Amino acid sequence: MPVILIIEDDSNINHLLKEALSKEGYECVQAFSGTEAELVLKQREFSLILLDLMLPGLNGEEVLRKIREQGNIPVIVLTARDALEEKVTLLTNGADDYITKPFEIKEVLARISVQIRHSMKTNLAEEKKEIVTYRDLCIDKKNFTVSIAGTVLPKITKQEFLILELLIKNPLRVFSKEDIFEYAWQEMYMGETKTLDVHISNIRKKIKQVTKEEYIETVWGIGYRLI
């Protein structure tokens, strides 16, 4: 089920959007300020974001910049500004689309549907890539190698490779130990964490052999993520 983050400080509009989107089968998360949105964005992954520009705390432009620092989540801006120059600026700064207020719900639903379909096609194309990179970290699925700035990490095991593959496909997203274990070992997680923790430790040691940079962060009580 696609998950949509609605960032809108007007509670009536926010609730209206949530009600309409929920009826269409979307899961919705609401934020009523830029500061709240920034916090929510660190907690989970979204399929699409509806972003108002006039927000308390961080304004919409600042929130958009932070979203783009994390990745390519589709963003539709909700704006009362109707000047062509401002709309061009929005698209140049990273918005995928914009809707001018006041708007019709049917138009919002149609624009969302287009962006999610496009995003799904893009994600499928990304999954087919043999080489995936993040910062200086690169995994080569064809040759089963992991490298940093061109230096290959020594003796990467199958599970270590799969752990890094999951993390690199979703940088900055926090994965639970259960999710990582089931992806890398392809079997049900039974609550034992030592095996996974040892593999994470080994990956870190191998990374330290080629760089002083940190790549894997422990999120205490939850799991790990690539930073």
Image (cartoon, rainbow, N blue to C red):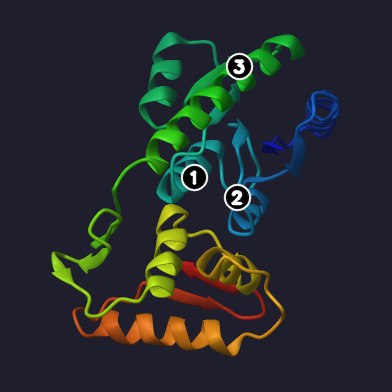
**Front residue (pair 216, 92):** 216
Instruction: Give the CA separation, mark 2 to mark 3.
Output: 20 Å
Per the image, label 2 sits on a secondary structure element best described as loop
Horizontal side of 192 relative to 141 (left or right) equals right
Q: Which comes before the other along the chain, label 2 or label 1?
A: 2
Rendered position, 226 above or below 196: above
Q: Which residue is mark 2?
A: 45
Residue annotated with mark 3: 111
Quarter of the image with the C terminus is bottom left
Report x, y in % for residue 211: 21, 78
Along the horizontal axis of the image, is 118 left or right of 24? left
Where disc 1 sits, the SS reads helix
- In the rendered structure, which amino acid carries the disc numbered 1? Ile
Marks 2 and 1 sit apart, C-alpha to C-alpha, by 11 Å
- Mark 3 or 1 closer to N-term? 1
x%, y% of residue 155?
25, 80
Residue that protrudes farthest toward the front in the picture: 187
Specify whether residue 166 is in view: yes
Element marked by disc 3: helix
Q: Considering only order in the chain, which callout, 3 or 2, is on the residue closer to the N terminus? A: 2
Please identify the residue farthest to the left as the structure is shown.
150
The label on residue 67 is: 1
Look at 73% across and 37% down and name the residue there.
Answer: 9
